[in-house]
């Protein structure tokens, strides 16, 4: 053989070996992944059907997807409905989580669905709120920056982190920095903010043009497009709602979650299995709210969840009165998403929470759904004011960057499209949740209609009997009159 031919044959052989080496493991890997994901999905869907998903069970689990507004439900509804002694130990933070607390009836946490496997079987009702994925990603970015920017009061990162490190052990409350996903997002953005400030002060960045887009101000804060493309955002932001409802966040209790997550990020088509599990979970929930339809969601929450909690308590309250004493109240009620990075005065907080717990309990005795809604309106408006004050003072530190509706309009279409594409499972899940939500609303209206029809038929019956009585009375009077006249006419004769 000529040397040239030799080379060609060798090259062909090499090519064959190379492709077979390359192709079959890939194929194998895909099939292996598919099996893994399918096995997980099947076992997740195996759980028995609840007897009645519309009935509130002993334990209410509020699966709080970050940045959906769940905190207002917690503060303005649930704290008014439940004695604090009935709340499970604060479980936003895995280490403190203790579902074995007797009588614990309310759990609000950023934990994903896998935590249900740790709870008493069959006696848990799950509720959640979903939000348009685009807004959820924006809000996650903005909140990470907002909390991180509070640390800019410090001269440098070392002093900022030392400060929080010193404060935390003393403080038994939960800070944003202890809660998934903020415990990853905030330190990441915080470090980035300090780095950019450092470069600015050293006259770096000078070649970069000033620009008008708050979501792309490289000199001050990590631009949105960089945020969404970072591996950390892939780990904990994108498709976050689907993963949390499925129980597959990177904070999951499922042993196989790591492998399943790895597979669906490698082969996006396998995400469909996860989506199906998440949809099924939504189907089985007691209540679903939508951040966008805020008023309707709150009203429905009061009617669907609030009403049942109240009637549960009417049967419970006598036993509660005996067992409810100060030492049983959960000692601290900090506002985890609100207080991150701020120095907290522990003694003050303690007093505050005891006072408010007392007030809440007095109010509960006479609580009705209508009063609950009234109190909610007041509560939410003060909560919103406090939030926007905090946001304003924090965003001042990264001025001229500022996050607002107007500023969002400057974000290029390509970035928005990319967010939607990175969150394609969440886009589907949100559509599905909207379907459930509007059905829920219809069912509720139907119930109300039946109720009012019933009461109006009561009213109709009442009117008829009134009429009958009137007519009878009238006849009796006439009879009396007539007989009286007869008597008088008889007398005359
Ligand atoms: C950070 O700030 C603190 C407090 O002003 C100062 O003592 C420390 O030397 C600073 N550290 C660095 C690395 O600049
Ligand atoms: C800067 O932003 C404002 C609105 O925030 C807009 O009206 C204005 O045209 C922008 N300027 C430039 C140069 O893009
Ligand atoms: C979750 O994601 C964060 C951010 O990427 C990472 O630092 C952390 O190690 C992950 N946790 C687990 C258990 O994989
Ligand atoms: C209050 O609770 C504590 C501990 O749970 C208990 O020892 C105490 O007897 C209770 N007091 C009353 C008045 O029930
Ligand atoms: C906490 O509050 C108390 C009472 O208002 C005050 O005396 C104390 O100095 C405060 N501590 C801190 C660290 O701010
Ligand atoms: C509950 O309402 C009744 C009647 O309105 C009132 O007499 C009672 O004091 C109220 N109880 C509480 C604890 O507010
Ligand atoms: C950010 O923008 C909002 C809405 O345009 C405005 O009300 C607010 O004052 C601005 N905040 C800062 C810190 O400039």
Image: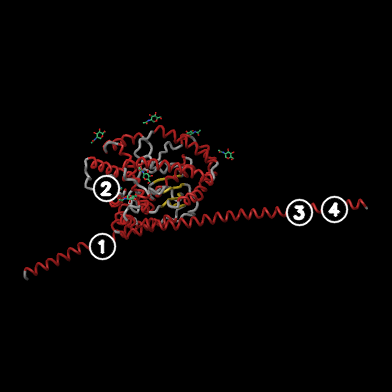
| Residue sitting nearer the eye, 325 or 167 | 167
Instruction: Mark 3: give few (<14), some (14-19) or many (20+) Cα within 10 Å.
Output: few
Residue 14 seen from this side: yes
Quadrant of the rendered image holding ligand 7: top left
- The answer to which quarter of the image holds residue 24 is bottom left
Give the left or right position of residue 115, taking residue 457 as reference: left
Q: CA distance from mark 2 to mark 4?
A: 105 Å
* Element type at mark 1: helix
Q: Nearer the viewer, mark 4 or mark 1?
A: 4
Instruction: Mark 4: give few (<14), some (14-19) or many (20+) Cα within 10 Å.
Output: few
Residue 102 seen from this side: no
The residue that mark 4 highlights is 483
Q: Earlier in the sequence, mark 2 or mark 4?
A: 2
Q: Nearer the viewer, mark 2 or mark 1?
A: 2
Instruction: Indicate the quadrant containing the N terminus: top left, top right, bottom left or bottom right.
Output: bottom left
The residue that mark 2 highlights is 210
The residue that mark 3 highlights is 472
Q: Earlier in the sequence, mark 2 or mark 1?
A: 1
Expressed as whole percent of the image width and height from the top left, the position of residue 108 reads 42, 45
Expressed as whole percent of the image width and height from the top left, the position of residue 136 reads 37, 51
Q: CA distance from mark 4 to mark 3?
A: 16 Å
Q: Earlier in the sequence, mark 3 or mark 1?
A: 1
Q: CA distance from mark 3 to mark 2?
A: 90 Å
Kindly identify which numbered label has been placed on residue 27: 1
Instruction: Mark 2: give few (<14), some (14-19) or many (20+) Cα within 10 Å.
Output: few
């Amino acid at each position: 053989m000529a040397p040239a031919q030799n080379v060609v044959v060798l090259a062909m052989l090499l090519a064959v070996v190379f492709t077979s080496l390359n192709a079959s493991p890939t194929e194998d890997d895909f099939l292996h992944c598919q099996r893994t994901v399918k096995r997980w999905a099947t076992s997740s869907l195996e759980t028995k059907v609840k007897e009645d998903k519309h009935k509130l069970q002993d334990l209410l689990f509020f699966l709080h997807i970050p940045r959906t507004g769940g905190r207002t439900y917690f503060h303005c509804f649930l704290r008014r409905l439940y004695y604090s002694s009935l709340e499970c130990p604060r479980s936003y933070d895995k280490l403190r989580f203790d579902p074995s607390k007797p009588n614990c009836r309310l759990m609000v946490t950023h934990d994903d669905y896998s935590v249900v496997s740790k709870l008493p079987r069959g006696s848990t009702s799950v509720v959640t709120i979903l939000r348009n994925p685009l807004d959820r990603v924006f809000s996650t970015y903005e909140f990470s920056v907002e909390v991180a920017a509070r640390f800019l009061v410090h001269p440098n990162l070392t002093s900022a982190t030392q400060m929080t490190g010193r404060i935390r052990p003393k403080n038994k409350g939960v800070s944003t920095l202890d809660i998934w996903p903020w415990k990853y997002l905030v330190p990441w953005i915080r470090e980035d903010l300090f780095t950019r400030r450092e470069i600015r002060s050293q006259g770096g960045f000078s070649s970069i043009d000033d620009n008008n887009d708050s979501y792309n101000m490289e000199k001050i804060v990590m631009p949105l497009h960089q945020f969404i493309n970072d591996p950390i955002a892939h780990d904990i932001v994108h498709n976050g709602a689907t993963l949390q409802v499925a129980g597959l966040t990177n904070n999951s209790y499922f042993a196989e979650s790591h492998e399943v997550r790895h597979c669906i990020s490698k082969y996006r088509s396998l995400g469909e299995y996860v989506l199906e599990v998440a949809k099924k979970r939504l189907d089985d929930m007691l209540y679903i709210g939508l951040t966008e339809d805020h008023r309707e969601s709150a009203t429905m929450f009061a009617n669907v969840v609030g009403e049942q909690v109240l009637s549960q308590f009417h049967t419970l309250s006598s036993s509660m009165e005996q067992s409810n004493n100060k030492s049983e109240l959960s000692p601290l009620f900090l506002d985890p998403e609100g207080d991150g990075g701020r120095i907290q005065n522990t003694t003050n907080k303690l007093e505050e929470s005891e006072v408010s717990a007392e007030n809440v309990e007095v109010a509960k005795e006479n609580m009705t759904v209508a009063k609950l809604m009234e109190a909610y309106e007041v509560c939410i408006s003060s909560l919103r004011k406090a939030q926007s004050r905090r946001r304003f003072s924090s965003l001042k530190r990264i001025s001229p960057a500022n996050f607002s509706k107007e500023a969002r309009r400057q974000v290029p279409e390509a970035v928005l499209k990319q967010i939607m594409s990175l969150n394609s499972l969440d886009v589907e899940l949100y559509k599905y949740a909207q379907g459930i939500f509007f059905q829920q609303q219809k069912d509720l209206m139907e119930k109300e209609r039946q109720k009012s029809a019933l009461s109006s038929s009561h009213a109709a019956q009442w009117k008829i009997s009134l009429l009958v009585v009137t007519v009878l009375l009238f006849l009796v009077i006439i009879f009396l009159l007539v007989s009286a006249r007869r008597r008088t006419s008889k007398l005359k004769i």
